[in-house]
Image (cartoon, helix red, strand yellow):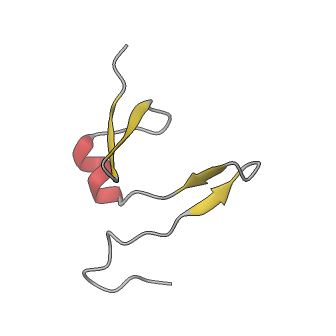
Amino acid sequence: MRRKIGDENIRKLFRIGSKRSVALTLPIAIVRALRWQEGQKVVVNLKNKKITIEDWVE
């Protein structure tokens, strides 16, 4: 189903694997703007009910 204009950043959560993990897709425009690649490692943090995703630095 195609999204309406203005709804491109609204996403649904879904279960994956052994049902212990939950995933969501990111809008391709955001992934391209950040120049992220498939398989890239990122760090996910939770602070005050907000999630941040940042590049993982070795």
Q: How many labels were placed on the picture?
A: 0
Relative to the observer, which residue lies in front, 56 or 47? 47
- The quadrant in which residue 15 appears is bottom right
Query: Could you tell me residue 39's position as x and y percent?
Result: 50, 34
Relative to the observer, which residue lies in front, 47 or 36? 47
Q: Is residue 22 above or below residue 35?
A: below
Q: Is residue 3 above or below residue 39?
A: below
Farthest residue to the right: give it.
18
Query: Could you tell me residue 19's position as x and y percent?
Result: 73, 53
Determine whether, in the image, residue 48 is placed left or right of residue 44: left
Q: Residue at x 40, y 57 (%)?
A: 26
Q: Is residue 56 above or below residue 28?
A: above
Q: Residue at x 50, y 58 (%)?
A: 24
Query: Could you tell me residue 58's position as x and y percent?
Result: 37, 13
Query: Could you tell me residue 32's position as x and y percent?
Result: 29, 48
Q: Residue at x 53, y 64 (%)?
A: 13
Q: Residue at x 40, y 32 (%)?
A: 43
- The quadrant in which residue 44 appears is top left
Farthest residue to the top: give it.
58
- The quadrant in which residue 3 appears is bottom left
